Image (cartoon, rainbow, N blue to C red):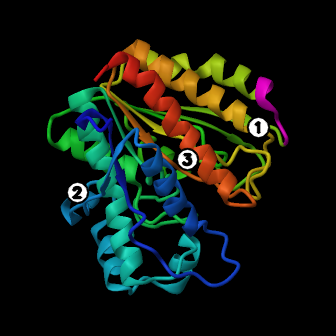
């Protein structure tokens, strides 16, 4: 089954070269692509490259220009945590392009998805935490510049706070940001989201889901014109950068609750992947695959082919 409403955008053709032992899970994206391609639930497409004009809607032009040219100061590149290369530039633009494409798909068909994105540590004038550009922030600003939406909500369930997204929109009354994250984890200087839920280390499924149930109505009560979901799978107990203790089944329950709430609300919904650093990395790839399978199950009921 490959109907147009189940298209997914992928950036895994841009394969960056990293030093041995580097923490960024570059292989995960190709693994995820292969899993979903084999199952055939989606039509996977290469993410287009976002235009520089769109990127500049959420990022300082000087930062964008210096990154593209490879002239960012070394301390700035160290905060990003990835070595500069032409492939990294293409991947960063494709990451944003995938989310923009998924959002346009969502506006047309009710939901859209990208296998990348969720780069929520990127600020207006610098990147951090493996994030160069903030794909969700750029996409929101792009949609507003085209008068396609006015209000947006971001549900960020990555184990790390969405600090870049929070800061970009901290004074914007038309964007609601929810972040549920591990309190003791990176970033160590948290920003202010519209609603932050800071969790204790080693929290397990039931306690986590109780917190989610309590605050999940808030972004939908905001009455957004579109909802973005940063669905990082790094709350898994097997994640080496996580510090929470969710099971794969707990993550499926998490995702299903978000998807079902979105379906009830009816606003266009955009799924991005976010982080996942399990050992072995196949556990993260499988957890991400579960997220997309669950999305298909929930949203295909609302939009039967």
Q: Is residue 161 visible?
A: no
* Residue beneath disc 1: 246
The single residue placed furthest to the right in the displayed view is 202
Lower sequence index among marks 3 and 1: 3
Q: Which residues are magenta?
A: 202-207
Q: CA distance from mark 2 to mark 1?
A: 36 Å
Residue 162 image label? 3
Q: Are marks 2 and 3 in contact (CB under 8 Å)?
A: no
Category of crowding for the residue at label 2, using alpha-carbon neighbours closer than 10 angstroms: few (below 14), some (14–19), many (at least 20): some
| Residue 192 coordinates in the image, percent (x, y) | 57, 41
* Residue beneath disc 2: 54
**Of the two numbered discs 3 and 1 in the rendering, the one whose residue sits closer to the viewer:** 1
**Quadrant of image for the N terminus:** top left
Is 129 contained in the magenta span? Answer: no
Left or right position of 248 against 207: left
The vertical placement of 183 against 70, above or below, is above
Q: Residue at x 49, y 18 (%)?
A: 260
Left or right position of 8 against 293: left
């Amino acid at each position: 089954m490959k109907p147009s409403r189940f298209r997914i955008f992928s950036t895994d053709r841009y394969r960056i070269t990293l030093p041995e032992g580097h923490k960024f899970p570059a292989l995960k994206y190709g693994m995820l692509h292969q899993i979903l391609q084999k199952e055939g639930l989606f039509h996977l497409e290469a993410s287009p490259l976002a235009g520089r004009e769109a990127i500049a809607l959420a990022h300082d032009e000087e930062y964008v220009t210096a990154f593209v040219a490879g002239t960012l100061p070394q301390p700035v590149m160290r905060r990003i945590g990835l070595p500069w290369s032409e492939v990294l530039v293409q991947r960063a633009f494709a990451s944003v392009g995938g989310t923009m494409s998924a959002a346009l798909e969502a506006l047309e068909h009710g939901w859209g998805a990208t296998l990348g994105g969720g780069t929520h540590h990127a600020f207006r004038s610098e990147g951090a935490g493996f994030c160069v550009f903030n794909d969700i922030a750029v996409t929101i600003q792009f949609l507003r510049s085209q008068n396609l939406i006015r209000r947006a909500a971001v549900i960020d369930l990555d184990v790390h706070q969405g600090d870049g997204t929070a800061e970009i929109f901290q004074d914007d009354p038309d964007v609601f940001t929810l972040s549920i994250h591990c309190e003791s984890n990176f970033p160590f200087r948290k920003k202010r989201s519209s609603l932050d839920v800071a969790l204790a280390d080693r929290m397990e499924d039931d306690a986590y889901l109780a917190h989610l149930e309590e605050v999940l109505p808030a972004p939908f009560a905001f009455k957004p014109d579109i909802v973005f979901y940063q669905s990082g799978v790094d709350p898994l107990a097997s994640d080496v950068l996580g510090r929470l203790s969710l099971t794969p089944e707990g993550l499926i329950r998490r995702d299903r609750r978000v998807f079902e709430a979105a379906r009830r609300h009816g606003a266009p919904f955009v799924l991005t992947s976010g982080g996942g650093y399990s050992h072995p990395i196949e556990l993260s790839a499988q957890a991400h695959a579960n997220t997309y399978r669950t999305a298909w199950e929930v949203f295909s009921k609302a939009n039967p082919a």
